[in-house]
């Protein structure tokens, strides 16, 4: 719209098209254009051009202004309805956005209006303002084609209960192809919470082909790889990564929050919608909030936001029977000589019935389930064990020395010194076994280079009666 001053007294608001018509009307008035030529220039019929020309002759520039400008539209909402809706918005939905407020006004209060109309009303009243955000360029990624091809997971930290209880985290899972949502409240974002959310999804839909997560310590290990990992040529894994590998689910680490945009955008929708829904429902406990998510909130939101995938196939895989054993904590521990294993400051005794496995000195797997139960596993087989009330007592050094022969430094006339190390070792071995050592050694003269044995040193020395038998020449 352009403002034009007429006769120095009146200001008219005209569109660009109406301003262009002024020049055409002046050309007709000066005789430079005929009405038929003007109709072709304006793109109007002869009849409509004559009507515009008559209004211009009668009213001047004001005759070119559209007659509907400044008048209320035929579909305009009644002023009473507008006042009522704005009053209800200020009373109950003051921190709601226009779209969400329009939904609640329609469902809870029976006041129906388009969200864009409500947005214009709020802007005209000064209740809302337009915010401009600086944007950065991102590379668009096409959605996966099938339901179950990729599950995006993330934890959303927010004051979900607006101070009515301590802060907590909402674990969110979104299917990349369909926008289908699953969520659950937990006290903190931990491996246990990730396991629980993943198991809920698997129980409802099946095993996804891949999981897309951020680089949190739950999913990525920052430690130095062990010797076994280095020899296997693999990076160190977290417990969640180990579980995904055993399930055959590909774990993908996102390079930025924008990379997993489906779940990140959902983390922007939920703090707006879910917080207000919990407030209106009067929910302050995690257990009630999770029930409300399952029965009311998530079904309604999935009907609103879910979309059809590009391919109708569901590529989820069947659920494994031992899923709870995989979604656990595992570590390797070496079995001690007393058939005990240590785990988190406690000691466990392997039963005698497992003796045939020869476990001493070998590494077995200690598995702790989410419910707290413990399993000792050797090459896929569960072992029988019992927990010890205390750590096994160490054997004192004095008790370990009882029954052993005290080492004595050989005397100067000892055979070891007299006949060489080999003979002395046999003498000492016989003495330790309680056998009378051989006496009367026989010494052989050393070989000489002329005998064809240069560099071989002296012949070995054997005590009498201890010479090995001669080799047979046959």
Image (cartoon, helix red, strand yellow):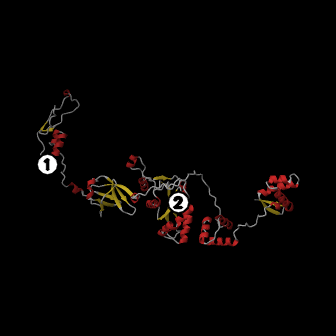
Most extreme residue toward the left is: 440
Q: Position of residue 290 (x, y in %)?
A: 48, 67
Q: Residues within 10 Å of mark 1 (few under 14, many from 20)?
A: few
Front position in the image: 240 or 158: 240
Q: Which residue is mark 2?
A: 180
The answer to whether residue 412 is left or right of residue 167 is: left
Q: Position of residue 331 (x, y in %)?
A: 37, 55
Q: Residues within 10 Å of mark 2 (few under 14, many from 20)?
A: many
Picture residue at 60% right of the left edge, 66% below the top: 100
Most extreme residue toward the right is: 31
Q: Position of residue 79 (x, y in %)?
A: 70, 71
Q: Secondary structure at mark 1?
A: loop
Q: Which residue is mark 1?
A: 434
Front position in the image: 440 or 362: 362
Q: Position of residue 440 (x, y in %)?
A: 11, 39
In the image, which disc is placed on residue 39? Answer: none
Q: Which of pointers 1 and 2 indicates the residue nearer the eye? A: 2
Q: Is residue 157 visible?
A: yes
Picture residue at 45% right of the left edge, 55% below the top: 317
Q: Earlier in the sequence, mark 1 or mark 2?
A: 2
């Amino acid at each position: 719209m352009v403002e034009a001053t007429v006769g120095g007294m009146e200001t008219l608001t005209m569109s660009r098209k109406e301003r262009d018509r002024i020049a055409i009307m002046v050309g007709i008035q000066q005789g430079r254009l005929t009405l038929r030529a003007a109709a072709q220039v304006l793109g109007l019929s002869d009849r409509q051009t004559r009507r515009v020309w008559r209004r211009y002759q009668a009213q001047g520039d004001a005759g070119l202004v559209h007659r509907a400008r400044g008048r209320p539209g035929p579909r305009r909402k009644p002023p009473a309805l507008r006042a009522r809706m704005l009053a209800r918005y200020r009373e109950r939905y003051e921190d709601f956005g226009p779209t969400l407020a329009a939904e609640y006004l329609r469902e809870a209060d029976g006041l129906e209006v388009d969200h864009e109309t409500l947005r214009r009303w709020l802007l005209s009243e000064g209740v809302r303002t337009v915010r401009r955000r600086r944007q950065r360029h991102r590379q668009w990624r096409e959605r996966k084609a099938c339901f179950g091809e990729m599950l995006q997971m993330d934890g959303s930290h927010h004051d979900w209960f607006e101070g009515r209880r301590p802060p907590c985290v909402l674990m969110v899972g979104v299917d990349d192809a369909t926008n289908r949502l699953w969520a659950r409240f937990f006290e903190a974002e931990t491996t246990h919470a990730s396991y629980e959310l993943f198991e809920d999804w698997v129980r409802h839909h099946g095993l996804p082909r891949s999981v897309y997560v951020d680089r949190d310590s739950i999913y990525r290990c920052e430690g130095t790889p062990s010797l076994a990992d280095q020899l296997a040529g693999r990076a160190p894994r977290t417990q969640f990564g180990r579980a995904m590998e055993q399930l055959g689910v590909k774990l993908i680490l996102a390079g930025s929050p924008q990379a997993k945009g489906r779940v990140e955008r959902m983390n922007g929708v939920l703090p707006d919608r879910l917080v207000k829904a919990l407030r209106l429902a009067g929910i302050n406990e995690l257990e009630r909030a999770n029930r409300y998510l399952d029965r009311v909130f998530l079904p309604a939101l999935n009907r609103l936001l879910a979309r059809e995938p590009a391919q109708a196939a569901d590529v989820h895989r069947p659920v494994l029977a031992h899923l709870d054993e995989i979604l656990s904590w595992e570590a390797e521990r070496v079995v001690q000589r007393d058939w005990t294993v240590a785990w988190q400051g406690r000691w466990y005794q392997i039963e005698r019935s497992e003796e045939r496995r020869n476990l001493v000195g070998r590494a077995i797997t200690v598995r702790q389930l989410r419910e707290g139960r413990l399993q000792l596993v050797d090459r896929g087989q569960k072992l029988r064990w019992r927990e010890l009330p205390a750590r096994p007592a160490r054997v004192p050094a004095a008790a370990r020395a009882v029954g052993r022969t005290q080492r004595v430094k050989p005397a100067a006339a000892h055979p070891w010194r007299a006949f060489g190390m080999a003979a002395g070792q046999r003498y000492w071995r016989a003495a330790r076994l309680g056998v009378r050592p051989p006496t009367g050694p026989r010494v052989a003269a050393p070989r000489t280079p002329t005998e064809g044995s240069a560099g071989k040193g002296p012949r070995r020395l054997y005590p009498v009666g201890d010479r090995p038998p001669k080799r047979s020449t046959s």
